[in-house]
Image (cartoon, grey):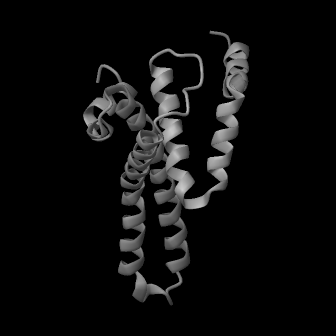
Amino acid sequence: MKIKKIIWDSMVYPFSNLKNVIILGIFCIIPIIGIPFVFGYSFRVIRSTLSSHNELPAFDELGEMFVDGLKVLLVGFVYISLPIILFGVFNVATKNAYFSDMYGMLIIMTAVILAIFAILLSSLAFIALGNMAKDDKMASAFKYKEIVEKIIPNR
């Protein structure tokens, strides 16, 4: 597929059903309650894309969409919690080194390493969501061996 077609399709796809875009925009305005709906709809888009549908999925079965959104939030939280925990442990472990000359450099190096780690894990989380959408099971988001095999085939 040519890059122009890919870019064009990605620009046209969201507007293939303007009604759904407007409804999604309304959910984005509603702060806490709307977030699971937005993530649930995004999950439906992933699922429909994996099923080779070229149209936006419908806004129906809102209860199911809300639950899917909560699942997506939970998967994202699990994947990003490790870098957050590591950063917290590091801060607690070095709390007595505040007056050291190397403390600032140590914090910066740790923050950079953990930021790179967080970026890698969040990329892995997107692939895990695709795996979850394909199998329609939340447990599939945590099948690490299967996910890594999709990234690095024939290891």
Can you say which quadrant of the picture contains the C terminus? top left
- Quarter of the view holding residue 86: bottom left
Determine whether 93 is above or below 120 in the image: below
Residue 93 visible to an observer of this rendering: yes
Q: Residue 32: percent from the left, percent from the top? A: 55, 60
Q: Residue 22: percent from the left, percent from the top? A: 70, 38
Look at 41% across and 50% down and name the residue there.
70
Look at 49% across and 14% down and name the residue there.
52
Q: Residue 6: percent from the left, percent from the top? A: 66, 18
- In front: 38, or 142? 38
Left or right of 54 on screen, residue 81: left
- Residue furthest to the top in view is 1
Look at 42% across and 77% down and name the residue there.
91
- Quarter of the view holding residue 92: bottom left
Look at 55% across and 45% down and name the residue there.
38
- In front: 98, or 89? 89
- In front: 66, or 141? 66
Determine whether 107 is above or below 125 in the image: below
Q: Residue 28: percent from the left, percent from the top? A: 64, 50
Left or right of 72 on screen, residue 153: left
- In front: 12, or 7? 12
Can you say which quadrant of the picture contains the N terminus? top right
